[in-house]
Amino acid sequence: MTMTTNLSDIAEVLKSRDNFEILTHKYPDGDTLGSAYALCRILRSMGKNANVIVNGTLSRKMAFLKDGLNDLDFDVQTVVSVDVAAPAQLGDLREKYENIVDVSIDHHDMNTPFAALTYEDPSAASNCENIFKLAKVMDANIDKLTADCIYTGLCTDTGCMKYSSVTADTLRTAAELVDLGCDNARINREMCDTKSVARIKMEQQILNSLTLHCDNKIAVVHTTMQMEKDCGADDGDLDGLANISRQIEGVYIGITVKEKSEKNFRISLRTNHGVNAAEICASLGGGGHIAAAGCTLYGTLEEVKNKIVEVCEKYLNTEYVA
Amino acid sequence: MTMTTNLSDIAEVLKSRDNFEILTHKYPDGDTLGSAYALCRILRSMGKNANVIVNGTLSRKMAFLKDGLNDLDFDVQTVVSVDVAAPAQLGDLREKYENIVDVSIDHHDMNTPFAALTYEDPSAASNCENIFKLAKVMDANIDKLTADCIYTGLCTDTGCMKYSSVTADTLRTAAELVDLGCDNARINREMCDTKSVARIKMEQQILNSLTLHCDNKIAVVHTTMQMEKDCGADDGDLDGLANISRQIEGVYIGITVKEKSEKNFRISLRTNHGVNAAEICASLGGGGHIAAAGCTLYGTLEEVKNKIVEVCEKYLNTEYVA
């Protein structure tokens, strides 16, 4: 049985329990890891045992979140998931954990409850804001390293306070974290202003592939498996590349064509000015949100690019109303 | 005679006067323009006459700051400068205005007083924060468009809340502006996430010029007059390009070599991990701050690049202590 509840109930349950395992979602990002390590620090500061189970690799960039936290040895009594919207997001951990999660704390608006007790606030720009509120309700001490963890989630899930999800509350939480000594400038730089050499090389390749269409309203870039190999790029290096084409002044539709395997391409659309990316991608068997959607197309790179540009051009000329 | 004072005094003076001319600094940016148009709106909301004198061009990107503000016709009684650190920053307006500025409101830490009355708070990350405080002291109405102007300065002077100058106070001011209805997500996108086609082309060229030296601790890129011409780039499109080479993971010194005229190159250094850019540039006749400095070198592009890399490599090997 699953039940959705408020933070006070969650706080009471956590206070009454011990020996915590804290789960992150697959392909763990700053928000799930920041939430997990912050909660781990908070629970340990209350004299409890807690470990984080990283659902994948703790990247070099995120390693500081774990500073000073050795893994403890104990028999698990309580399982908590953070920033996990649905059982599928547990990835490799799903089979073992799906039916034994006691508490889930999340901020996704499409949450599928799977834990015994769920707290969910989709108005929070990051799940770390929920952890911050929880810490206050629990009257827990938030030290500098805990503040760093929480700030990391705020920063990475909002593009450094940039996205439309940022509320006055997000900014006030950030202010409180700065008051608590968090290293906001360093975290901002490392999360939002640092690129691997492989990433820089991929950006170079991507910009070299740029073409503009339809009075510069459509921008198209592509990546190939060969490019990824030449640049030594892994998945982390490809993160957010789909935003590059949308950033260009005057562009309504930014298209990124990514070769997945031979003649198999993942298309990512990012749009401005209310262009409905989900609608365009749905017409090609894909889907997504208004400003960010995707689909899969098959053919040669040239065929696929021509196809998606044609569909987007037709949309702008016939269906789009500014 | 010049005098430095507090915001209450500034508020009293502004309340007792009318017919304001508000001056911005040369090459006007988001903070000086945001400060000026916000103050103009505040004074007009109090029934006073006020105009902004744009010290240069109001770029397309910044034009929204003036929305709904027609220039008024009146005899000037009071001159106010905003975000102007010294008379030299008045540029072409210096001769006419240097000795007749009544009130200066600024946030630079190297302010050279030139107005009859100066308010200066170098702890403010942006001068717009000073304008916001002033509006509160004056008990002025801050409408949505005024909040947009103030937020624009906060956003542009902090790289969208990213730099080390951001304090808890900056974030709290941003939160209050969001409460007042400011369009933070749109402003963030237009100021920090939108690039002209010429800019994108320049970034492409710059990434193509990238070389790494000294175990990837030194990154060098260059721009030439021909590249600028080919890309159709103006000064606005070149803004901040010097940061690209420093963003690379593991880089201690990011070097940008910009051709100014034949065999004349402007070198910009941006550094991480405490490398003293000012010291390096001083040894070549230039100067600046610890993390951002510059100098001029003469020769062919290749000679100049070899020279600056050699000097930086020597610094890292002999003078730098991590």
Image (cartoon, coloured by chain):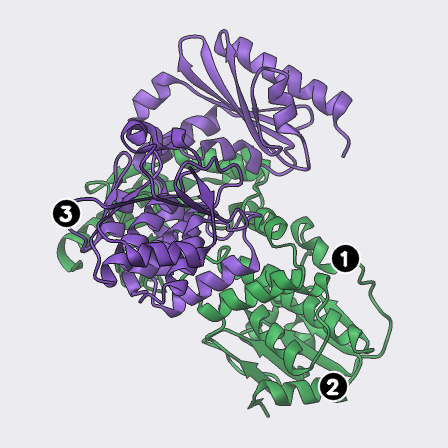
Chain colours: A purple, B green
Name the N-terminal-most of marks 1 and 2.
Answer: 2
Q: Quadrant of the N terminus of chain A?
A: top left
Q: How far apart in space, not on screen, are marks 2 and 3 (Cα)? A: 68 Å
Tell me the residue at 31%/67% (across/down). Answer: A141
Mark 1 — residue? B67
Q: How far apart in space, not on screen, are marks 1 and 2 (Cα)? A: 24 Å
Circle 1 crowding by C-alpha within 10 Å: few under 14, some 14–19, many from 20: few
The disc label shown at residue B15, or none = 2
Tell me the residue at 29%/59% (across/down). Answer: A42
**Vertical position of residue B209 compared to residue B114: above or below:** above
Q: Point out the frontmost of discs 3 and 1.
A: 3
Q: Nearer the viewer, residue B190 or B60?
A: B190
**Vertical position of residue B307 compared to residue A322: above or below:** below
Q: Are marks 3 and 1 on the same chain?
A: no
Q: Amino acid at mark 1?
A: Asp
Give coordinates of residue B193: x percent, y percent: 54, 44
The disc label shown at residue A74, or none = 3
Q: Nearer the viewer, residue A49 or B26?
A: A49
Circle 3 crowding by C-alpha within 10 Å: few under 14, some 14–19, many from 20: few
Give coordinates of residue B82: x percent, y percent: 62, 73
